[in-house]
Image: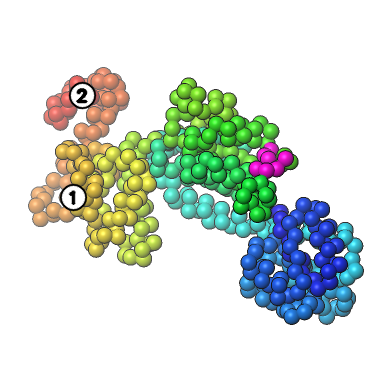
């Protein structure tokens, strides 16, 4: 981010006045200190981007102050000034961590050059820092967006198609389905990687504060605005802004977001100057925006501007085959965070997790597992460790026959059940039991997809029609239901 606030410390009033006037003319906020003690106090209390310090001041010298600032404000850039043009001073200043060194007297264009150089250094440092964080986040993201269901595979395909462009995306889905994760995945796979990703929940901020949060404000714009503040759009410049719960945005702000999309510029609250911004917008909602457009509670023109590429995240109850993988990930994550040995879910617990409707979606699943891990002292979690879910379950909800799991999950669950009761097993039981449990959901699924057409279903399954009819009778499949 560019420089905005500078501290000038010099015991010569004339030098403070000249530098203050020159820097303020360039649009910077400038504070002045007459000695090292005052400068130290102001830096401790304030938030400065650059300090210009005279090397000789009453009390604490510029060099001694530089030593203290290295530990106190390691990210603060410091320029040292001196009237003594000696190599010793220059070397000493740079050794102690000064960004640059000025010899008095100097022309004001030298100050302009220094400020420009500092700006470039800050921007480069900021980009490197952001890139490091985003690469770390991207690595984490690749592990946390979990699911191999058909619905999630479609989402991955869409991310791959839209990420390289700057096209506006609308992520739709119930609360807790992971809309921000998808927005981050788009950003991390775009050309804007290394630039800021700024997220804002429009429903979490009072309406009267939302405008200044988005667009920033000028000093004196309202009571309490003691200094200029950059809004989320300026903070995200060059990168991506994620507007979560866009459906909760007031109508007057909807018009201003539309202007940003059209004109690519914003105006701070209390300001009159238009500021250009280069920002990609990704919006998200758990509401039916089309219905809101019909009811005139959401602007139609903004809806079509935001909904260029919609990504729909299905609720967890509609991709149950992903629950096992998600549960195992959240188990490992919770154990790592709590620094305890790894835990596992037994078949009864996993069946309960798979069968639950999860109105809070992935977020509710994660919280339920974390709660179970914290409260249980056993390494193997059972359905008893999820009393809230068990109490909500209706008779027949828990899929003891494996329905709701993937075929691989069914086989694994049945094998675990079998080997847990080895003393009761007879020779040949495992193969027969697993095949019987896999056959029923498989045949039901194919019949459902062929709308009960047994000839077509038999062809897809690769078996004789008479064999299929026999299996339907043996397995008790209700054709009226399927």
Residue 76, image quadrant: bottom right
Q: Is residue 46 above or below residue 64?
A: above
- Quarter of the image where the C terminus is located: top left
Left or right of residue 40: residue 476: left
Give the residues in magenta.
265-272
Q: Are marks 1 and 2 in contact (CB under 8 Å)?
A: no
From the image, tell me which residue sits under label 2: 481
Observer-nearest of 334 and 289: 289
The residue carrying pointer 1 sits among few (fewer than 14), some (14 to 19) or many (20 or more) residues within 10 Å by Cα, namely some
User: Measured from the top left, where is residue 250 in percent x and y?
Assistant: 53, 34
Left or right of residue 353: residue 431: left
In this rendering, does residue 157 appear at all? no
Left or right of residue 345: residue 239: right
From the image, tell me which residue sits under label 1: 417
Q: Is residue 267 magenta?
A: yes
Observer-nearest of 50 and 125: 50
Observer-nearest of 459 and 240: 240
Left or right of residue 290: residue 456: left
């Amino acid at each position: 981010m560019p420089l905005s606030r500078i501290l000038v410390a010099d015991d010569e009033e004339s030098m403070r006045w000249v530098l203050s006037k020159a820097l303020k003319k360039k649009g910077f906020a400038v504070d002045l200190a007459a000695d090292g003690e005052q400068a130290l106090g102001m830096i401790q209390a304030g938030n400065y981007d650059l300090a210009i310090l005279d090397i000789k001041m009453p009390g604490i010298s510029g060099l001694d102050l530089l030593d203290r600032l290295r530990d106190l404000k390691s990210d603060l850039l410091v320029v040292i000034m001196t009237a003594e043009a000696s190599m010793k001073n220059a070397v000493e200043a740079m050794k102690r961590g000064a960004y640059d060194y000025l010899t008095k007297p100097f022309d004001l264009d030298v100050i302009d050059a220094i400020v420009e150089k500092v700006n470039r250094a800050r921007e480069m440092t900021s980009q490197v820092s952001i890139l490091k964080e985003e690469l770390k986040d991207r690595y984490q993201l690749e592990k946390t967006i979990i699911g191999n269901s058909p619905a999630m595979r479609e989402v991955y395909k869409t991310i791959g198609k839209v990420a390289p462009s700057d096209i506006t995306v609308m992520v739709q889905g119930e609360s807790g389905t992971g809309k921000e994760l998808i927005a981050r995945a788009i950003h991390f796979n775009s050309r804007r990687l290394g630039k800021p990703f700024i997220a804002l929940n429009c429903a979490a901020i009072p309406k009267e504060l939302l405008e200044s949060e988005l667009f920033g404000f000028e000093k004196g714009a309202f009571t309490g605005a003691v200094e200029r503040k950059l809004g989320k759009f300026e903070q995200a410049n060059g990168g991506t802004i994620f507007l979560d719960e866009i459906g909760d945005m007031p109508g007057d702000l909807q018009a201003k977001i539309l202007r940003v999309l059209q004109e690519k510029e914003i105006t701070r609250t209390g300001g009159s100057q238009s500021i250009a911004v280069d920002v990609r917008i990704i919006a998200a909602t758990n509401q039916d925006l089309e219905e809101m457009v019909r009811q005139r509670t959401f602007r139609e023109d903004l809806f079509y501007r935001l909904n260029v590429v919609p990504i729909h995240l299905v609720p967890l109850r509609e991709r149950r085959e992903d629950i096992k993988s998600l549960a195992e990930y959240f188990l490992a994550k919770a154990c790592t965070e709590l620094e305890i040995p790894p835990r596992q879910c037994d078949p009864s617990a996993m069946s309960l997790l798979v069968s639950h409707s999860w109105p809070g979606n992935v977020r509710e699943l994660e919280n339920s597992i974390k709660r179970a891990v914290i409260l249980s002292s056993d390494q193997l979690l059972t359905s008893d460790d999820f009393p809230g879910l068990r109490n909500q379950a209706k008779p027949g909800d828990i899929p003891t026959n494996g329905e709701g799991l993937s075929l691989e999950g069914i086989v694994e669950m049945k094998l675990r059940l079998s080997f847990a009761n080895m003393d009761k097993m007879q020779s040949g039981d495992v193969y027969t039991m697993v095949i019987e449990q896999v056959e029923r959901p498989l045949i039901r699924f194919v019949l459902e997809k062929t709308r009960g057409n047994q000839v077509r279903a038999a062809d897809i399954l690769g078996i004789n029609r008479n064999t299929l009819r026999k299996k339907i009778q043996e397995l008790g499949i209700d054709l009226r239901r399927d």
